Image (spheres, rainbow, N blue to C red):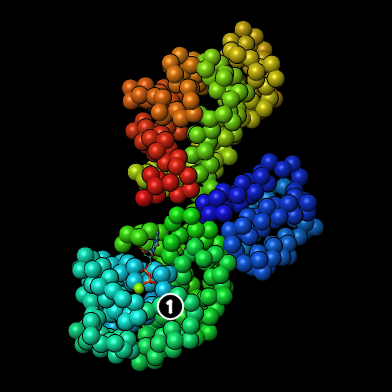
Amino acid sequence: MVLAELGRKITDALKSLNNATIINEDVLNNLLKEICSALIQSDVNIRLVKQLRENVLATIDFDEMAGGLNKRRMIQSTVFRELVKLVDPGVNPFVPVKGRPNVIMFVGLQGSGKTTTCTKLAYYYMRKGWKTCLVCADTFRAGAFDQVRQNCTKARIPFYGSYTEVDPVVIALDGVEKFKKENFEIIIIDTSGRHKQEDSLFEEMLQISNVCKPDNIIFVMDASIGQACESQARAFKDKVDVGSVIVTKLDGHAKGGGALSAVAATKSPIIFIGTGEHIDNFEEFKTKPFISKLLGMGDIEGLIEKVNDLNMKDNEALIEKLKHGHFTLRDMYEQFQNVRKMGPMSQIMSMLPGFNSDILTKGGEQESMARLKRLMTIMDSMTDRELDSLDGNKLFTKEPGRMIRVARGAGVMEVEVKELLNQYAKFSQMVKKMGGMKGLFKGGDMSKNVNQMQMTQLNQHMAKMMDPRVLQHMGGLKGLESMMKQLQQGGGGPLGKGLFN
Ligand code: GDP
Ligand code: MG
């Protein structure tokens, strides 16, 4: 299971709590079963998964808790905390000091991404204004120095290496001493790897470490090796004093769970992750934001899926209705429910390129969500006939007594019911227009069937039918348009290129 999918599974499981009428031990056990099986399928070590489960169970005491809301929140935040613990060894990473040499040595197996990552890290510090350089102490792999030379030349990073010297220990020490004399602040040593964990590799690693006395040793781990990460991390940690970890290849189809939770074995924090071959595919790693993003990712994937679903077979009933321009109050209710299920809007929005998170201020988002909830409460007081009528609005205007009844049932003013019905009228008008667009619902992919003009038209309709306050929070019509585009382009699957790159 790739990370995005893991995030979605866990998010779904946590959200299912919101729909449960009672929260008891059975519900918790089921929730944990789902989360744990997702974690295991993502290659997280079984022992750690078991630990997580036990920790949650030990924290949640049903006898002591009162009130459904409280229980939900308790469970959700406990699970979140435990997930953070999985990737957080509770150790602070090494922080380089300005104005003096900081020697950073890389270790890891061949092919794990050391050389690539050395360049990425050097580039990262260089852009932040540190005097940065790279030493190539890999004499094992043919062409290793050429690779460093090429990378560094492209990124304009000063480098040191040798075509003639065969002892990596000598090269490392020469390079470090030279750069120290030249007052470099970040001196990165790239070392060789072997295909397996071999004594000769560890021997060489130890020697370089002993003579160069690095301030930090970074262990580079390839996420795609899954469960094997843990024993590998442990083997390296046993030999040298690994201070931090960088997990590479977290793009593509790596399951990632194994690598991320291997921090438990190294007891050293992950400081960066590599998400591609390019020098920019490098992200700082912080546990809490990572887990939030992971769970938010579930949302965004879900969001894309929802949009795709709307075009696809799963929603045939709705599509059939839309084709005929039919849209009931119940359909609207269900759409609102979907929006609410998708979770905090700003979290989703902030992940879409072109949106920055302050478009949706926190207060604004809460307001929008609260408003949606209020509208749904009103609809909860409607009868089936009202909800399923093809022209619910008419039903209410013909028999105004219904309005009074619903307002009373929902505990709101009549004028609010009226506003809701207005909103619904706009929605259903829009659906009628969509139903009239030829070929819109043919085949699966809506974006392929709509030409640019129709798309613009559709967006304008969308904008009209949305609550202006919500629309405003989303950056106005322009924002909505670009969001629609992003969604259509980005629907390519986990970490779809259009979304994150
Ligand atoms: P080394 O043997 O440990 O020095 O590994 P290299 O730096 O030479 O990398 C081995 C391969 O992995 C190269 O083809 C890199 O382009 C690739 N690579 C490194 N990091 C990443 C990453 O984060 N994502 C992807 N997709 N490829 C990576
Ligand atoms: Mg290398």
Which residue is more in the foreground, 91 or 108? 108
Residue displayed at 53% across by 30% down: 312
Q: Is residue 311 visible?
A: yes
Check the image and report above or below for 201 versus 343.
Answer: below
Residue drawn at x 33%, y 25% as measured from the top left: 452
Image quadrant holding the N terminus, namely bottom right
Q: Residue pushed farthest top?
A: 398
Give the residue drawn at x 58%, y 67%: 227
> Does 388 sit left or right of 214 as displayed?
right
The amino acid sitting under disc 1 is Arg
On the picture, is 36 further left or further right than 428? right
Say whether residue 413 is left or right of residue 23: left
Task: Identify which residue, 210 or 97, lies in the foreground.
Answer: 210
Residue 422 seen by the camera:
no
Badge 1 crowding class, 10 Å Cα cut-off, few under 14, some 14 to 19, many 20 or more, is: some
Give the residue at mark 1: 194
Up/down of 396 relative to 350, above or below: above
Spot occupied by residue 48 in the image (x, y as percentages of width and height): 64, 68
The residue lying furthest to the front in this view is: 142
Tally of numbered discs: 1
Query: Residue 177 occupies which quadrant of the picture?
Result: bottom left
Residue positioned 45% across, 21% down in the render:
440
Depth order, front residue of 10/363: 10
Give the percent coordinates (x, y) of residue 375.
58, 29
Residue 211, percent from left and from top: 35, 92
Name the residue furthest right: 63
Q: Quadrant of ligand 2?
A: bottom left
Mark 1 vs ligand 1: CB below 8 Å: no
Q: Looking at this view, is 226 or 343 the one in front?
A: 226
Q: Quadrant of residue 411?
A: top right
Q: Position of residue 385 (x, y in %)?
A: 69, 16
SS type, badge 1: loop
